[in-house]
Amino acid sequence: MTFTVEVDVPVPMRDGIALATNVWRPAGPGPFPALLVRTPYGKDDAGLYGNPKLPDVFAFVAAGYAVVAQDVRGTSRSPGIFVPHANEGRDGADTLAWLAAQPWCDGAVGMWGGSYMGFAQWEAAVLGAPALRAIAPVMSSADPYAAPWYSPGGALSQDAVLTWATLSALRNLRRTLADKKGDGGADGHGDDAGHGAGDGHGGQGDGQDGGQDGGQDGGQGHGDGDGHGHDDVADVGRLMSGLSDPGLLHDPLPLADRVALTRHLPWAGQVLGHPERDAFWQEIAAIDRCADITVPALHVGGWYDVFIRETVRSYTMMRRHGGSADARDGQRMVIGPWCHADGMDLGTFPDRSFGLEGSIKTADVTGAHLRFFDRWVRDRTDTPDDANPANPASAGGAGAGASDDTHRVRIFVMGVDRWRDEVDWPLPGTRHTPFFLDGAGRANTAAGDGLLTHDVPETEAADTFRYDPRHPVPTLGGTVLAAVPGSYPGPADQAAAEAREDVLCFATPVLDRPVEVTGHVSLVLHVSSSAPDTDFTGKLVDVHPDGRAILLCEGIQRARYRGSLTEPALMEPGTVYELSIDLGVTSNVFLPGHRILLEVSSSNFPRYDRNTNTGTTIATDGPDDLVVAVNRVHHGPRHPSRLVLPLIERPSPERPEPERPDPEHAALERADSEPTTKIAEAEARP
């Protein structure tokens, strides 16, 4: 293969700044379609070209595409100041216009990339650049408030914010130190360090490298010349200490008192200062303007990725509200058993292995991108792609036989640990079925009396626990951004959490047949508290015969945001309120011998910030402000608290027909048909 590479091509923006850009062009006269990636992690970093989550750049070039990689404003070799989200829309649109005007480009451009690189795609797509024909965001979001910085229930995603912001502040600080040394800030030597391969979430090891290099570049320099007299080299140490010790990163209060962090990334202070989904967030939420996005999208996600809710919601919203027929029809989605952190996408975890098929290396991410771009950038309707039922990779999927047999969605079904093609999401025929919370009021710990039943309980009861923000329930696996010492993301055993008195557990009896749960999971709780504000959390757990309690998905609802993310309302202590909690999405077959279990508590730290229970501004509350809340979950005929599961019931090789009458299936049918027990199904988040 022969190709030409131009390095650090200056691409002018509307305000006169020029962003550093690399261009790979295939051999031949052209013109070529172009595929653009815009990254804050360094366009020259090897991680951009060797990360298994991302497509192979050289395969793009071999297929006849020009590949264009650009350092976003204020990062690596591009001048300016890096302010997350502030310039990606305009700078992306300007870059697309520049590409379309190049003699070697045929005017058709696609965008690709993961994590923040996905933000750059959505924020450019909403502006309607004529040259843009398709986007392919990997593990990303069109609503940065909902993921990754806050959550659908209004709690701060503390792990994501502090981990990513600390790594970004270290990169900014490295540029400052390089400027002082005379290495050139715009050149940004060394800014490529301090992040994981491809997306900046490689965990503490990569972050330490970036901080250490920054300290070396800074030499013995002190202060920054602004009269404030702080020590940049000392700030490197402060920031690095949090990456090496999660207690130093997450525990100190007030949460807003992160001086070194906000000094080198002021945006972090803005995030903490905007806990509501106000104009600060609405202005960058492409999801709110789907009608302005006229291009198809290939969405790639992981069941344990911090972005997974929004990956799926972006797909469903664009299917319904995209701004053109191509945008609506051209949505495609691939989801595997993966986490966000680099190396956590191989399908193998300490508490759960999904086998060889669970590795992202088996998912052919490059092939999926090529088929997608050939169809929508090159407009090759004769090229087989994942939507073609004649494609062997799609034929025979569980959705076959539907009126529309286009396979838009490919998912890894956990439990049976197999890939499956589907016609759409939510899966056709999904039945959102309530499982009611029951028991005598002693559901504390997994040894308690909490039950999940198909019928509305006959008697009223309430389970009580004390939530002390000084001793929150620790995060065990799940959708955290990066591994920290002694912990890891993904399908972790929750047994340690379920031994706590402040964790309520509600479980089904042992199953005698497979039960598939694929789709959006929600939880409706009737709650009261002694505090004017508190949180309620939920986790869906697969309890294995050997006792492992494997996390599938989770969520949180901050009580003050129970009615609106823009207009908080405090609770009256002792009053019962109904809360709807988005527990995210999953695909799992609960096998015979397993149990379905729901955990309920009031904290999941540091995945989310701790509610101080005061009803005031949480980010500015200090350690002396913390209040213990006595929280109650009510259940019974007057307070039908319920877990709503998306059940998939189809004959298939993985789901054999039962050989005898199935009492569980009959109970589900009664729940749907008997008016006396029918409860309106909770709306799953789209």
Image: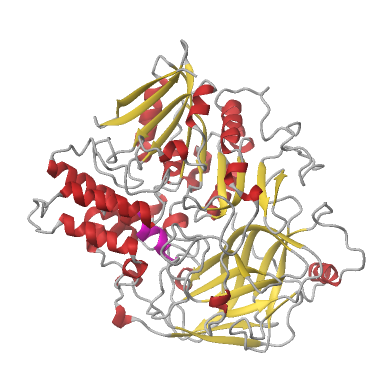
Relative height, residue 288 to residue 600 (above, below)? above
Drawn side of residue 488 relative to residue 164, left or right: right
Could you tell me which residue is drawn at 78 percent across and 63 percent down?
A: 514
Instruction: List x then y, in percent, for residue 678.
Output: 76, 71
Q: Main secondary structure of the magenta part?
A: helix
Q: Is residue 401 magenta?
A: no
Q: Name which quarter of the figure residue 617 lies in.
A: bottom left
Residue 640 in sight from this viewpoint: no
Relative height, residue 188 to residue 196 (above, below)? above
Drawn side of residue 264 relative to residue 530, left or right: left
Q: Name which quarter of the figure residue 197 lies in.
A: top left
Looking at the image, which is closer to me, 126 or 433?
A: 433
Q: Name which quarter of the figure residue 391 lies in.
A: top right
Q: Which residues, given as a range, are shown in magenta?
A: 155-164
How many numbered marks appear? 0
Residue 253 in sight from this viewpoint: yes
For this orientation, the residue located farthest to the right is 660
For this orientation, the residue located farthest to the top is 29
